[in-house]
Amino acid sequence: MNSQAAALKPVAAVSERDMANAIRALAMDSVQKANSGHPGMPMGMADVATVLFSRFINIDPSAPNWPDRDRFVLSAGHGSMLQYALHYLLGYEDMPIEELQRFRQLGSRTAGHPEYGHALGIETTTGPLGQGISTAVGMALAERMLAVRHGADLVDHFTYVIAGDGCLQEGISHEAIDLAGHLKLSRLIVFWDDNAISIDGPTSLSTSMDQPARFKAAGWHVQSVNGHDTDSVAAAIEAAQQSDQPSLIACRTVIGKGAPNLGGSEKTHGAPLGVAEIAATRENIGWAYAPFEVPDEILFAWREIASRGQAVRRAWEQRLAASPQRGAFEIAVAGALPEAVFEALSVFRKEHVEKATKVATRKASEMALAAINSGTELTVGGSADLTHSNLTITKGMGRIAPGDYAGRYIHYGIREHGMAAAMNGIALHGGFVPYGGTFLCFADYARGAMRLSALMGQRVIYVMTHDSIGLGEDGPTHQPIEHLAMLRATPNLNVFRPADIIETAECWELALRSEDRPSVLVLSRQNLPMLRQRHGDENRSSRGAYILREPARHRAVTLIATGSEVEIAIAAAERLETEHGVAAAVVSMPCWELFEEQDADYRKGVLGLAPRIAIEAAARLGWDRWIGDTGAFVGMAGFGASAPAPDLYRHFDITPEAVAAAALKLII
């Protein structure tokens, strides 16, 4: 407890109504001062939040990251003042009253929506609706998996979520609740803010969904309560904690509860109440205090919750100290992979250079994963119903099943977006390194959660196969064209497109070592030759791009390619040399992002001064930064077609002959 809390003295008995009104007052005052924000949800859900925190949740603001804390996810992130008010009242050291007074201002910790890493105790970024509840599914799954491995003495906590109508209307929520119900994630408890209001007005304008029936159909334990009856809320939480299913508690609430003229109206959803309505609300709820003032006795009651959590945390630390599982548990939570994994990948590279192994990079990924997964128990794999196309499972992983969490492989079903969000939750929870597979074109479905992986800096690895027109007969709906450009435009995301089995192993190593960002492994369906001439200890892909073929004499042209098109660049360079006497260098560029991080001299040395041609069976967008104003591009200018891969490459003129012709046109 901080020094401010230590000085507080209880003056009189404090009711949960008083504690909830503190949330209401702080929410409406902060939004009013900022002249921006959403006061309605925090005011409406203040009673539910008060019951949850005062009677049930185990957190310790003085040690906000202790591993066995309960997780709290504000999925209805627009109501962020609920979370910030709670954090101030509970005594988080980085949330003094001044932060509430700077709500939504530049440099404050009180951003418009809860942002992971901006303030202590925020478990995940929950701006886009539906992401919070979906990420929480991954957290709840990680809790169950970690408990199986290390025992209930060390892992025994709940994941609590406050979600609104927006969270449940977004399509990702269907994927998430279906997966959670199927897996029987009984430690997941969701409070639905059932206020029947959205921005446009009554929810009846756009939906007639029976949400409790929907959750029941998905295998959830469902209850409905008056969200302003604190004892009913408490009884529902107790029942939810005893269920062997995930739980939905539908809380009928009044948006803007306490506001005498605007309560129950969409007008409280996303705008300040106004000076007159705030004054009337103070009178209506009996809050006779100045803006941002919370009396000592109420603040003391909230800080007592933190004291309770601190006691729970200290008891857990004693159990940890006495546990024979301590070492393994601390290694898992730290997320540090053993060096033996990376040594195994080095041996793997040496072996396959010597064998000149020719396989599709999706198969190379599977082979590298066999070495990785045998060297650590921390990796957890999965696929969105494409396991035997993505090749993401390896021998001995074991499958996660309803009520059985001992395995390491998750069948996410046909739920790309839900898979990506769940992997975020697994990574945020700690204890595992998640990876999951789908086709590259289905990055469209996963995009929202992938963006949050990057925004939060989480080590989530996306295995995306069938990376180009090279997938062939499935046709243009499945052939990704613009997807590489979309992913490369995302900050803090490494996009790897390896050219052969060696680069694939190198890219896996880099993805595993990137603890502060997600990675996408973009992999081919078609077989690709091994292009590396000799084994070396250096991970050449770590610089993002490198010279794969340097001519004996001064280069006349530089061919830059990624993935399956590096083979084409090599063939074009040989054709230029033997048929035209043109000295062509070949640069393999498996990762633009890592190449950008290199110093100017390295980049200049790789790219050279000669004219440049980029070869990639995808859209041109972004390539001009590497080829310059006078460079050429050999790739796709539109969507693909349905045909065998070799026919498609010829049809779209992505061939050694086309590259050679483009080179001659540049230099002659």
Image (tube, rainbow, N blue to C red):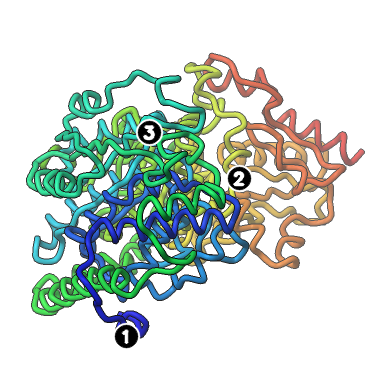
Q: Which mark is residue 336?
A: none
Asked whether disc 2 touches disc 3, contact meaning CB atoms under 8 Å apart, the reply is no
Q: Where is 550 relative to 475, above or below?
A: below
**Residue 71 at x, y = what percent?**
27, 57
The first of marks 2 and 3 along the sequence is: 3
Answer yes or no: is residue 180 visible: yes
Is the residue marked by circle 2 packed among few (<14), some (14-19), or many (20+) residues within 10 Å? Answer: some
Which element is circle 2 on? Answer: helix
C-alpha distance separating marks 2 and 1: 52 Å
Q: Indicate the amino acid at tag 2.
A: Arg
Of residue 324 and residue 393, the one placed in the foreground of this image is 324
**Residue 170 at x, y = what percent?**
41, 31
Quadrant holding the N terminus: bottom left
Quadrant holding the C terminus: top right
Q: Residue at x 61, y 41 (%)?
A: 566
Which of label 2 and label 1 is nearer to you? 1
Q: Indicate the amino acid at tag 1.
A: Ala
Q: Residue at x 37, y 30 (%)?
A: 196
Of residue 548 and residue 170, the one placed in the foreground of this image is 170
The residue labelled by disc 2 is: 488
**Residue 159 at x, y = what percent?**
24, 51
**Residue 28 at x, y = what percent?**
47, 53
Q: Where is 641 relative to 148, above or below?
A: above
In the orientation shown, which residue stands out farthest toward the right? 668
Say left or right for 341 vs 188: right
